[in-house]
Amino acid sequence: MKEVRTRFAPSPTGFMHIGNLRTCLYAYLFARKEGGKFILRIEDTDRERYVEGAVETIYRTLEKAGIDHDEGPDKDGGCGPYVQSERKSIYMEYAKKLVELGGAYYCFCSKERLDSLAGEGGIKKYDKHCLHLSREEVEKRLAAGEPFVIRQNVPTEGVSEYDDMVYGHIAVPNADMEDGILIKSDGMPTYNFANVVDDHLMRISHVIRGMEYLSSTPKYNLMYDAFGWERPAYMHLPPIMKDAQRKLSKRYGDANFEDFLEKGYLPEAIVNYIALLGWSPKGNEEKLSMQQLKEQFDVDGLSKSPSIFDEAKMRWLNGEYLKAMTPPQFTAAALPWYEKSDVKGMFDYDKLSKLLIPRVEILSEIPEKINFLAHFGEYDPAMFEHKKMKITKPLAREILAKVLPVLKEQTEWTDEALKEKLSSCAAEWQVKSGQVFLPLRLAVTAAAVTPGGATEIAELLGREETIRRVEFSLGLLDNDLKSVGSAE
């Protein structure tokens, strides 16, 4: 049985777009599911769009995403070089061979002549002018050093057909295809030629890429056939949409993998989410580890329809990953955000993590959720008035006065122990438990909204700080009630 070999061949033109990463992921998962090899190839022939540092971004993204390649620029598997710009002589050799086989020809047409070919609707289609030059004329012009390109010789009649693993039978009339350039005037190949040569020489068995190449693939197959090479199998993928009308676009800065990491998404959650953009597992489970994806990925689950990128859904999925963490695991992931927050170094981060795990969907939410802990001071006692809970400032003051000695006597300072003790006190005092816990939470946080309840925050603050804050709040309420009494 032929070895399955897939490839990811990004252009180093900037950040890693989510659409590119999904293509990479599917190629990787298919190879792993089939026990094959996954190859990384850098397609850097478009020197005008080359971005410094983009190759490093590719490596960094794959590492963070948990996608390991078997061969590539840094892992020679005998099919290198794996960088297109280092393969220039290979392309010229095969282009000349294709000319000899009749699948391509030299073109010496000037820019002015090409500009004059605008046809119906202003679309320029090359007229095969140089195909008809004699061999002697071609050799004479080459010897004279005339600039040239090498063009593909596409038949003018008939239909080119193939079967795609996702979209089924594809047929394109040859008359609809142009004699595209294979080798540019600077000697560098175009993508259309380089990908065919590279995929053959690297023994790529399955080409997995975006559906924008569906109609171009017949041109590639004509080259495979002219060389007498076996065609690979093709798996074209539907686009990922920003909304019903617009595709996600790298050009407009949409959906950059590293931007999502900076927002506080976990790489494994991003990978999990994009795996589901265009593919459905057989079960209903949505939270899937990389190992589960490798085991479950199959072509049958691929959709022909575009998928809409829903960040709210990815945010929810990220929250599910966070909820599954232990406090130390959460702390390790959250550390950069703890260090950016106002409470840096003030608390035991694992205790903070215990508080935040069920209440955070993305890690960048952390500073705004915990900064209040660092800013306890004067606040408006009106906060204690709560109609629904039937709490007034005098009742809050009475409750806190009873709670304070209980806290001072408490030996086990944990959320569970404090909650149990204060709940029994509420029953003893014949008040609702909420009428105890709400005033206590306000008294130790001075914040209307906080992650976690009174006893969770008390555990985090510790005995001394909790008691200090309750005493401060009691003083605040005493002064407020005195001023109200004197005003009356």
Image: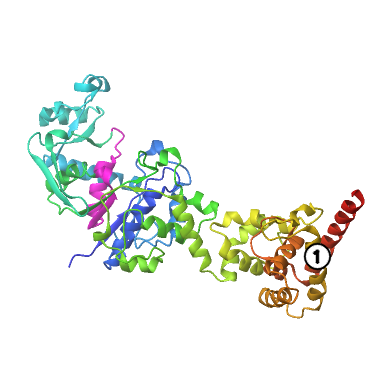
How far across and how far down the image is residue 210, in percent? Answer: 29, 47
The correct choice, above or below, for 154 with respect to 317 in the image is: above
Horizontal arrangement in the rendering, residue 488 relative to residue 245 (left or right): right
Q: Is residue 208 magenta?
A: yes
Provide residue 150's location: percent of width, then percent of height: 21, 35
Kindly identify the residue that appears in the image at 52 percent across and 64 percent down: 322
Q: Which quarter of the picture shows residue 338? A: bottom right
Residue in front for this viewpoint, 487 or 340: 487
- Relative placement, left or right, of 328 versus 125 is right
Q: Label 1 sits on what residue type? A: Val
Q: Quadrant of the N terminus?
A: bottom left
Q: In the image, which residues are magenta?
A: 185-213
Let me know if residue 118 appears in the view: no
Circle 1 sits in a helix, a strand or a loop, which is it? Answer: helix
Q: Is residue 403 above or below residue 94?
A: below
Please report the residue visible at 25 percent of the width from the left and 50 percent of the height from the top: 304
State the residue at coordinates (41%, 45%). Answer: 12
Residue 178 located within the stretch drawn in magenta:
no
* Residue, disc 1: 470
Residue 50 location in percent, x, y? 42, 40
Total label count? Answer: 1
